[in-house]
Amino acid sequence: MMNIDLHTHGKLSKKTDFSLGYFLSMVREASENGLDAIALTEHFNTRRFSDLLDRLDQTFEYIGDYYSVEGLKVFTGMEVDVMETGHILLIGNRAIIRELNDELEPYKEKGSFIPFGRLLDRTDALPLLRIGAHPLRRSTPLAHHPAELLKRLDGFDLNAKDLYEEGSGMAEKVNAFAREIGLPVFAGSDSHQPLQFGSVWNRLAESCETAEELRSRLLPGTHEVEISPCLPVKVKGAQMMKELLKQSMAAG
């Protein structure tokens, strides 16, 4: 069995540098909340994206498609903005993620994001798990994209932040949208701050070592999506702490 969160971040915000200490506080909180694995889907245009992977390379063993961090599997990935609005999570081997991030350099500024179809074309043949992040979020929806493009994804993200802001009805809406497109739904906390871990997660019958294994075990939709009854407290607490930390950093 493996409990995994498929949408997480290793930094407080895009503008901050990577901190190993902060990252380890995230990892420890994830483990304390019963997770066996997370997908580290940092924003593709975060400040000094490569620094994050460089530091992890220097510090932790890499097995299959994940770093082994104090007993937690940390699968590598990134979150990519597309031109027509929306975010796509790509999870796979660190070498593929590095290469794609370098290729996306011309597309990292707002107003010049890569077209959705072009991103799909570039990644269709790669051993990646591709997830449409928070598909019904008001600020970055995916529902306006043509169904023929959305069907090329592996699934959609049931996002803890959206569940907190929109209420439990958001789960029903995301599941209905996914059924309409014909894709499964995967849980992601969207954590930027430790307290948010354990708000949602996926329960798989078997442990995985690679993104291809993750994909093969998630696509049938036989996994269980778990939503904690403490989700509102976790997400609200995480958001409040995030703002306090950002204010403290700005003042200091």
Image: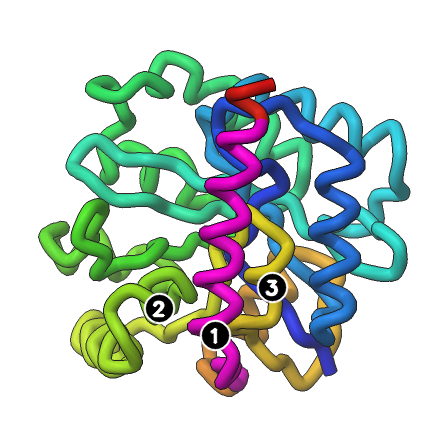
SS under mark 1: helix
Label 1 close to label 2 by CB (< 8 Å): yes
SS under mark 3: loop
Answer with mark 1 or mark 2, whichever residue precedes in sequence.
Answer: 2
Mark carried by residue 223? none
Mark carried by residue 231? 1
Residue 223's x, y, as percent?
A: 53, 83
Q: Which residues are magenta?
A: 223-248
Is residue 225 magenta-colored?
Answer: yes
**Residue at the disc numbered 3:** 197
Residue at image point 21% right, 31% down: 83
Q: Amino acid at mark 1?
A: Leu
Answer with mark 3 or mark 1, whichever residue precedes in sequence.
Answer: 3
Label 3 close to label 1 by CB (< 8 Å): no
**Residue at the disc numbered 2:** 164
Mark 3 to mark 2 CA distance (whole Å) = 13 Å
Residue 73's x, y, as percent?
A: 77, 58
Q: Is residue 203 above or below residue 45?
A: below
Q: Quadrant of the N terminus?
A: bottom right
Residues packed near mark 1 inside 10 Å, few (<14), some (14 to 19) or many (20 plus): many
